[in-house]
Amino acid sequence: MAGTGQRVRIGVIGGGLMGRELAGTLGRWPVLVDHPAQPELSAVADIDPAARAWFERVPSVQHITEDWRALIDDPDLDVLYLAVPHHLHEEIATAAATAGRDLLCEKPFGIDLPAAQRIATAVNTGGGFVRIASEFPFFPGALTCHRLITAGTLGEVIEVRAGFAHSSDLDRGKPVNWKRRRATCGELGVMGDLGMHVAHLPLRLGWHPTTVYALIDDIVTSRPVRAGAPEHVACDTCDNALLVCQVPAASRQVPMVWETKRIAPGQMNTWWFEALGMAGGVRFSTRSPATMAQFIWRDGVQAWLEVQPGNVSAWPVTSGAIFEFGFADALLQMWASYLAERVGALGERFATASPAEALAAHTIFDAALRSARTGGPITTGGSTA
Ligand SMILES: NC(=O)c1ccc[n+]([C@@H]2O[C@H](COP(=O)([O-])OP(=O)(O)OC[C@H]3O[C@@H](n4cnc5c(N)ncnc54)[C@H](O)[C@@H]3O)[C@@H](O)[C@H]2O)c1
């Protein structure tokens, strides 16, 4: 039965694209079966009046403010969702974490590695339940990859490839925004935007690279200040990053390639994952969300099986298993896992990214930046995921 869980009042700091997505996610909450939480969007903080006005359409929202500190101080809120530009992550996350608040932080976990380390320290001090947003592993095809790998079907791993690619920045006439500027998005650029999505599943599987070699590309270096304007300003974040990594295994180093791209012709919003082993393999891409592929090698026959996992993710839903799964479903599943884990009810289900995983991802992206500067491979120090 749906709708029987404990009430959880959520406050959003940053009511832009992702803050609004949360309103949609919570609106669909009744499709979850027997979930322990009954969340509602109670409060919103945003400095932009238009962003604040949008939330007037959400009946559960009682408190709309321009001051994010008011939400951190609000004892009526149980969980805060931080969805602001990257240069604000550290200040807001640190204040909220130090106050002991339960948080779902949008990625990246701070604008760079030192910021991530300081946020992690605040989380440890405050003791709140903190996780980092990464929804793509909740696609049924991605979860099937995870299940088959943890069941040992790959045998010795040969290589791993994971990536996330957009093409919206192909248009040189697209105006600049905070995600295209180093001051607000960070030197990590596309790795800050897309990297946690790529890192989450490999790190969950324990594949933490100890060596990183990166090719980082800033293709479009200036953009119009607004649509059609002749004036251009610097667009000084990197667009594409290719990381060639080595993951230590029992007898050798396993190659692992991570791609994050804003300029990938033909890719609207494609997340993919592939792992090949001596005994089997798995492959999934959100371009074909209803299917994943499993490689089998049996009696001398090699074959890729097309598997349709159905609409079956971490948490059961009332929607039929035959229906197609999409981005909004992935967000619903991520929130369902976050809110279940928060009350100790996740069980064996797939969990949202942890601060340790986000820190590990930052360690790798920091090594990538250093590799791009020096032109050679960088040893990450092998922190654990
Ligand atoms: N998980 C995903 O799939 C996904 C997708 C897109 C973005 N994101 C992440 O979500 C976060 C927000 O991105 P977005 O696309 O929603 O950006 P956005 O620009 O659409 O929204 C950001 C909002 O923050 C508000 N803001 C800025 N300064 C503020 C302040 N001092 N106090 C309160 N509000 C303030 C802005 O007015 C804006 O409404 C980023 O960390 C981004 O990387 C995640």
Image (tube, rainbow, N blue to C red):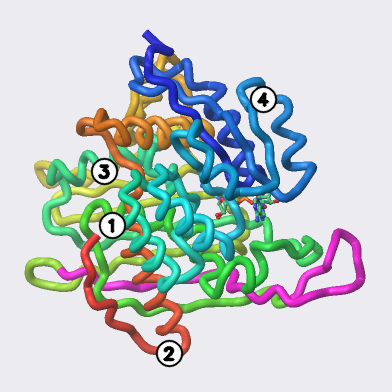
Q: Circles 4 and 1: CB distance less than 8 Å? A: no
Q: Earlier in the sequence, mark 1 or mark 3?
A: 3
The image quadrant where one finds the N terminus is top left
Q: Residue at x 58, y 49 (%)?
A: 69
Considering depth in this image, is 291 or 139 the residue closer to the camera? 139
The answer to if 85 sits in the magenta stretch is: no
Tag 1 residue: 203
Q: Which mark is residue 146?
A: 3
Say which element carries label 1.
helix
Question: What element does badge 4 sit on?
Answer: loop
The disc, 3 or 4, on the residue closer to the chain's N-terminal end is 4
CA–CA distance in space, label 2 to label 4:
50 Å
Return the mark for residue 375: 2
Which of discs 1 and 2 lies nearer the camera? The answer is 1
Above or below, 152 relative to 179: above
> What is the CA distance from the residue labelled 1 to the residue labelled 3?
11 Å
Q: Which residue is mark 4?
A: 58
Residue 229 part of the magenta-drawn span: yes
Q: What kind of residue is marked 4? A: Val
Tell me the kind of residue under disc 3. His
Over which residues does the magenta segment extend? 222-248
Report the front residue among 41 and 228.
41
Q: Residues within 10 Å of mark 4 (few under 14, many from 20)?
A: some
